[in-house]
Amino acid sequence: MALITFPTSYAAREIRVFPESVVAVSRSPFTKQTQIYDYDVQIWHISFQLVPKKGTDAAEWTQFITDLKGQLNTFNFDLFNYVPHLPNPSTTTFRLKSNQVGWNKNKNGFWMFDRFEAIQAL
């Protein structure tokens, strides 16, 4: 497992950041009572939708996605600009949520990248 450098040209159409609390809910099939288990853990998710890329920017992103090798490797991302209450810097380590991230090239020569999601690596 390796830490891959996040691309410097990360102009994005949209970056979504959201927390996930680790909570389990169980409901009895007999009494219908609910029990909630709070494991007191919260992890971050991020979702990127990139602007179309050309040339070296596209090459940098395809190399980054390829180097991640799906969920194997990780990368660092600073959440400070996306979560107002976090201290600066708030660098967090992430891994892809899926093993597949794709891209294609449109007729104008721009590379279009799929939206991709990552989850905090604990």
Image (cartoon, rainbow, N blue to C red):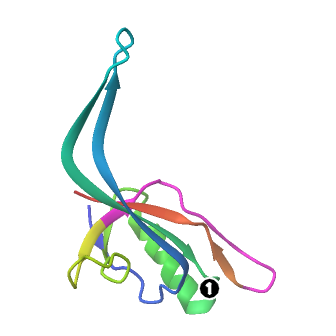
At a point 54% along the width and 62% down the height, the residue shown is 101
Identify residue for label 1: 53
Does dot 1 land on a helix, a strand or a loop?
Answer: loop
At a point 28% along the width and 41% down the height, the residue shown is 23
Other-residue count near label 1 (Cα within 10 Å), few / some / many at <14 / 14–19 / ≥20: many
- The quadrant of the picture occupied by the C terminus is bottom left
Look at the image and say whether residue 105 sits in the magenta stretch: yes
Q: Main secondary structure of the magenta part?
A: loop
- The quadrant of the picture occupied by the N terminus is bottom left
Question: Between residues 84 and 76, which one lies in front from this camera angle?
Answer: 84
Question: Between residues 18 and 13, which one lies in front from this camera angle?
Answer: 18
On the image, the x and y values in percent for residue 98 come to 47, 53
On the image, the x and y values in percent for residue 37 come to 23, 35
Which residues fall within the magenta stretch?
Answer: 94-109
On the image, the x and y values in percent for residue 6 come to 37, 79
Tell me: 7 left or right of 80. Answer: right
On the image, the x and y values in percent for residue 100 come to 53, 56
Looking at numbered disc 1 in the image, what kind of residue is underneath it? Lys
